[in-house]
Structure formats: structure tokens, C-alpha cells
Image (spheres, helix red, strand yellow):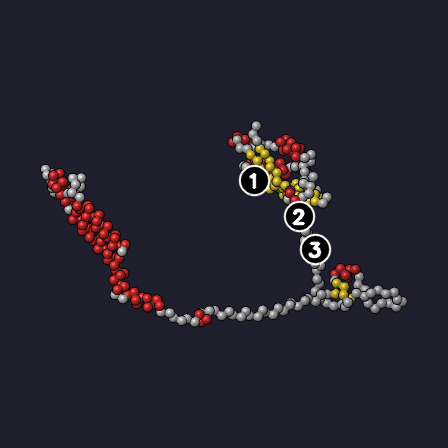
Amino acid sequence: MGYVIFIVFLLAVSLLLTLDNSWMNVLQQVRNNVVFANHNKEYGAFTLRRDYNKRLGLALALAIGVFVFAVGAPYIITKLGGEEELVEKKKKIVDVNLELFEEQPEEPPPPPEVIPPPQPQIETVQFVAVEAADQPVDEPPPTQNDLQETTAGQTTQEGQQMDAPPPPPPVEEEIFDLAAVQEQPEFPGGMEEMYKYLGRLQKYPDMEADAGIQGKVYVEFVVEKDGRVTDVKLKKGVSDGLDKEAMRLVKAMPAWNPGKMNGKAVKCRFVLPVKFTLR
């Protein structure tokens, strides 16, 4: 029903355009004859206006025909029985045994038998307990030199000499963050003395001074248990010259008062902002 209304609307619009007999309609033949009475009618504008209604009607008829064909084609195909065959094909259901397509899980192979490697025979020397007696001893006990070269055992046997196990690696001490320690590390004399130290020894780089570069350089370091400043790293820099000067100032610092946990000195990580300001 909607298609029919649309077609009727197009026809009505085209009829209104062709039936407009007012003087303002530039497509009216009477107006064209008056306008081009003393002009060359072979001029393109006259021909276009004269034949406009014919061309409009032809184009409208062609468009309506194409539209009707596009809309009516499925309906015609349905009437001819094409849709019934399609519906029958859609309704055809084939039973499929899905078990044939499922992959059966394979049983994992048994784990290989682990055969421990043969233990090497260790060279030992029989340890003889020394007892006080009047009779001479047939086999004297091993000396200290013998025990340094081999291992004492219940019997004397030949074998490989086993080196002593290496000592365990040293345990690295924990480095605490500044907020985690009970007593924070402190520069000798406090923060005020530290800033005096920085201001006294600070040397402003010439390149940054000429360019007017200033700011804060953040330097990270570790205060050891004995107060030494180690592991100095650049946390956040400003420029190459200011960064190097800040690192130099921190590395040259005297020993701090170390941080403490439960009254014992511990390693503590510290981040210090070194400020550079042009005066």
C-alpha cells in the first residue's frame, strides 16, 4: 500500500508542474513564444524550455517503471512459486550425528620413569678411635693432613675427592623507603644545614646560566647503616648541566645520621630535590 501512495504522489507532482499556466512558469509555451519572438529559436534555451515537459514526462515514466519493476519483482517471483521452493529448502532438516565430529580426548602418555643418577663414590679414610692401651696399635688414626685431603668415614675406600660446598651467597640487606622507617635519616645538623651546604658548594653551569635555565633536579640515593651516601641516581632532571651538578653535590655529601628500625640502623632510600635558581 505504501508503494502505491508514493507512486501517486510522484504523478501528482509531475501533473502540477505541467498544468501550471501562470506567467511565472518559465516552461509555458506561450511565454517562450513571446520571449523568443524576435530571437533565434534555434538557441539552446528555447529548445530546452520547449522540450522540458516531454523529457520530464519520459524521465518520470521511466523512473516509475524501474521502481515498479524493482518493487514488483519479488512479488512476481513469489507468485511464480520460487518462494515456495525456497521455503521447502529452508524447512529441510538433516539429522547430523555431532558425536562423529567431536574430538575424543587422548589419554596422556604415562610419565617417563625417572632414574636417579648414580652417586659418585667418595674417597674416605677410616677413622679409628684412640683408646689408651699398652699394646701397639696396628692402624694409627688419620692425621690432620689426611683429613684435610679426604673425608673421615667408617672404612677406608678409594673414590672421588669431593670439594667442600661453596659458602652460601651473602644475604642482601633490605632497603627501606623513607616513609617505612621509624626514624628517618638526617643530614648532620638537620635540613637547614643541608641546604646551607648545597648553597655553599653549588656551582651554576655556565651554559644553563646564559640560557636562563633553572628548576629542581630530583636525585635518589641510599643512606647506608653507617650513614654513607651510596647508589646515587637521577630521578628527574632539568638539563644536562644542572643534572650533573646535582649529582656531584649529593655524592660529595658527608655521612648522614642513618635511619633506624626498632633502634637499629637500617638502609634507607632518600629522594632529594636540588633547587637551581638564577639570582
Outermost residue to the right: 134
For badge 2, the amino acid type reads Glu
Whichever of labels 1 and 3 marks the residue nearer the N terminus, that label is 3
Which badge, 1 or 2, comes first in the chain's sequence?
2
Q: Quadrant of residue 232?
A: top right
The image quarter in which residue 276 lies: top right
Helix, strand or loop under label 1? strand
Which residue carries the number 3 mark?
Answer: 167
Left or right: residue 39 compared with residue 105: left
Relative to residue 218, is residue 96 drawn left or right?
A: left
Residue drawn 17% across and 45% down? 19
**Element type where label 3 sits in the image:** loop
Determine the CA span between mark 1 and mark 3: 40 Å
Q: Which residue is mark 1?
A: 236
Give residue 146's position: percent from left, percent from top.
Answer: 77, 62
Q: Nearer the viewer, mark 2 or mark 3?
A: 2
Instruction: Return the mark for residue 81.
Output: none
The picture places residue 141, in percent across and down from the top left corner, at 81, 64
**Quadrant (top left, top right, bottom left, bottom right) of the N terminus:** bottom left
Please indicate whether residue 96 sits to the left or right of residue 222 in the image: left
Please name the residue that numbered disc 2 is placed on: 174
Q: Are marks 2 and 3 in contact (CB under 8 Å)?
A: no
Amino acid type, residue under disc 3 in the picture = Pro
Can you see residue 65? yes
Give the quarter of the figure containing the C terminus: top right
Q: Residue furthest top?
A: 279
Where residue 35 sits, quadrant-wise, is top left
Residue depicted at 14% across the width and 45% down the height: 50
> In the depicted view, which residue is nearer to us: 81 or 128?
81
Disc 2 from disc 3: Cα separation: 21 Å
